[in-house]
Image: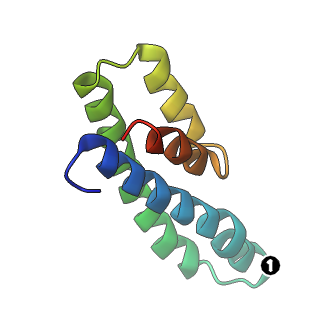
Amino acid sequence: MLRSSIGRLRLLSILEGISYLLLLFIAMPLKYLAGIPEVVSVVGAAHGALFVLYILAAVHVKFEHRKTILWGIYAFILSFIPFGTFYLDKQLKHEQ
């Protein structure tokens, strides 16, 4: 999976998606409902790092596989939608 640019993007899309869901559905409620803001700091930092790696991997796939700019925008937008990166992973699975 890690040998190809698409494989790396698939892995990062899964990790980034999990971190986003943890941030939205666990860390944020703990911050606002339970008064534990430290969880957002930890999960948010991990999510931020994974997001940057995801974008870099998407750019790498875009250029290596000569994807359109619309595909790059599509991959970027999916990262803001809960479960969106899992959808991208499903699509990329067929390209590998």
The residue carrying mark 1 is 33
Closer to us: 1 or 70: 1
Q: Is residue 56 above or below residue 27?
A: above
- Could you tell me residue 30's position as x and y percent? 70, 79
Q: Is residue 11 above or below residue 42?
A: above
Q: Secondary structure at mark 1?
A: helix
Residue 23: quadrant of the picture: bottom right
Q: What residue is at 68 percent from the left and 69 percent from the top?
A: 28
Amino acid type shown at disc 1: Leu
- Could you tell me residue 57's position as x and y percent? 31, 42
Q: Quadrant of the C terminus?
A: top left
Q: What residue is at 56 percent from the left and 72 percent from the top?
A: 40
In the shown orientation, is residue 43 left or right of residue 30?
left
In the shown orientation, is residue 59 left or right of residue 86?
left
Q: Is residue 21 above or below residue 10?
A: below
Q: What residue is at 49 percent from the left and 33 percent from the top?
A: 75
